[in-house]
Amino acid sequence: GFRLGQLQVAISADFITLGDSHVFADGCSADSSFGQIASAVLNVPVGNAGVSGYGYVQVNLLLERLMESHQPKAIILFCSPWLAERSISWYAPTYNGTVPVPYVYETASGELAIRRPLYKARLPRVDDEAWWDLYVRADVLNTIIKLKMILGIIPNPHDSQSEAESFILNEIKQRLEDNDVDLIAVNMSHNKDYDEQLIIETFGETNVIDLDPILWNGV
């Protein structure tokens, strides 16, 4: 589903924004998110499908579901080095411990692939006394997983962030092409040292908007 503002009730959208907390607008009202502002300016439905803490692998899997449920005309993908970094980690930090997430790994044949989460996290309700599930159970499972990775029973995340980023961005590109959906890629790295050339090479210069000059100029 989408994060909806007070004035938005539509469950469909011609445009969908994808990314992490910057897209979700963590710490801000839904009406202050990029998607809501763009919807008001363009006068078209824009769905906010950003999720805090997401990486490119999770974005790609979410995109798979959105293609089936919403058939958008275009996707607005926010790109950053954080999304790439999260794609080569098998867990994600949260305010209350860690949760397993999908990640990019190298197969025995040397090809890159996506590994689904290594176990299903159990998140308690607010009124639950579920500290065992949230902390001890997770710690035990995480320790077992680390040992299995050392022994080679479970594949480690790929050791090259740039290779993993190239792989998953091309997976996203192929998925959009297969569904005849347009793409606008927005580079928002907050990092002067980050090379957005990979994003440009993957999606084409005309499809990439670089927000960094605006952000670094303090606007």
Image (cartoon, grey):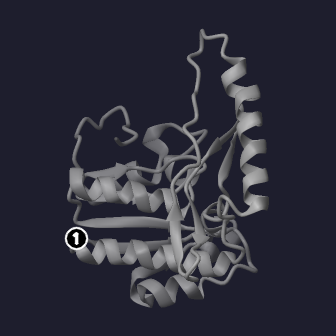
Residue located 23% across and 58% down the image: 14
Label 1 CA crowd tier, 10 Å (few <14, some 14–19, many 20+): some
Evaluate whether residue 217 shows in this view.
no
**On screen, 11 above or below 207?**
above
Q: Nearer the viewer, residue 80 or 44?
A: 80
Q: Nearer the viewer, residue 152 or 73?
A: 152
Disc 1 residue type (three-letter): Asn
Evaluate whether residue 141 shows in this view.
yes
- Across the whole image, how many numbered discs are drawn on residues? 1
Of helix, strand and loop, which one carries label 1?
loop
Q: Nearer the viewer, residue 140 or 33?
A: 140
The quadrant in which the N terminus is found is top left
- Rendering coords of residue 90 (x, y %): 65, 55
- Rendering coords of residue 185 (x, y %): 45, 73
The quadrant in which the C terminus is found is bottom right
Q: Label 1: which residue? A: 179
Q: Nearer the viewer, residue 37 or 172?
A: 172
Q: Quadrant of residue 212?
A: bottom right
Relative to residue 87, is residue 181 drawn left or right?
left
Residue located 40% across and 71% down the image: 172
Q: Quadrant of residue 96?
A: top right
Relative to residue 68, is residue 135 drawn left or right?
right
- Rendering coords of residue 135 (x, y %): 74, 28
Relative to residue 152, is residue 27 drawn left or right?
left
- Rendering coords of residue 211 (x, y %): 56, 72
